[in-house]
Amino acid sequence: MTNVIITGCCGKMGHSLISCAENRDDLKIVGGIDIIKPENAGFEYAKSFSELTVDADVIVDFSNPALLDDMLSYALSKKMPVIICTTGYSEEQKDKIKKAAETIPVFYSGNMSLGINLIIELAKKAAMVFGSDFDVEIVEQHHNQKIDAPSGTALMIADAVKSVRDETEYVYDRHSYRKKRDKKEIGIHSIRAGNIVGEHEIIFAGIDEVFTISHSARSKTVFAIGALNAAVFIKGKPAGMYDMSDLLAEK
């Protein structure tokens, strides 16, 4: 049994995690962190980690970048693994996450969907096959309440493509200059509208040929399932950085 603490337990993802956990017998939600007190939670609640007294095995984080320092401090003091699903971190914060991974296991992914992580691998393969003869454009769509843009997932896809292409740069907006598209560009475009859960499309466009890979998330459940699978996976692992490719490798 894996005992889990959720940060952001009263948010939309927190509710999805709690709901998904109720149908599993390999883990249990034992604690939650949020500024809002949950109703009839069935686990210990606190506004900060300093107030939490429950024993747990793993922290699953769907919260806000502002909580990172408090969470990492607690995890390091307890030698507890963390599943970091929050996006929008600064480069300085990303360095803190990497530093923590020298002492504890850290599972860090901008998207916990198995499907998304599969298309990331497919995009990487496509980039290797097509090379510089095909232009690459990434279009991501999310709900109108999402704060960060582009999405962490879009950047994960771009990074995967960049890893197999030379002299690549990201271009987020072309309205401010007039010139032909450079071959080394990867265009990244963000749409924020309605209650779109998550849509990602990777376009490889060559001469008289367009190859497209897409993924559509219809509910937040897919992310919750992935995060809980990661929590079970990481228990007992040595210190280091982990992501969905490590989880997929065990399937």
Image (cartoon, rainbow, N blue to C red):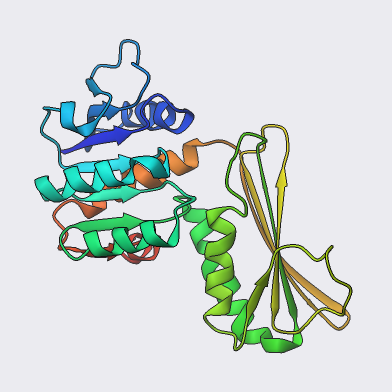
Quadrant in the picture for residue 246: bottom left
Residue 228 visible here? yes
Horizontal relation, residue 179 to residue 185: left or right: right
Near-viewer residue (155 or 129): 155
Horizontal relation, residue 117 to residue 134: left or right: left
Residue 110 placed where, x, y %?
47, 54
Near-viewer residue (26 or 186): 186
Tell me which residue sits at (17%, 43%) in the image.
74
Residue 3 placed where, x, y %?
18, 36
In the image, is residue 183 above or below residue 124?
below
Tell me which residue sits at (31%, 49%) in the image.
83
For the N terminus, the image quarter is: top left
Tell me which residue sits at (24%, 23%) in the image.
46
Residue lying at the far top of the rendered structure: 40
Near-viewer residue (110 or 147): 147
Tell me which residue sits at (44%, 53%) in the image.
89
Quadrant in the picture for residue 108: bottom left
In the image, is residue 60 above or below residue 89?
above
In the image, is residue 137 above or below residue 114?
below
Quadrant in the picture for residue 43: top left
Residue 119 visible here? no
Near-viewer residue (166 or 16): 166
In the image, is residue 150 above or below residue 223?
below
Residue 113 placed where, x, y %?
48, 50
For the C terminus, the image quarter is: bottom left
Residue 85 placed where, x, y %?
40, 47
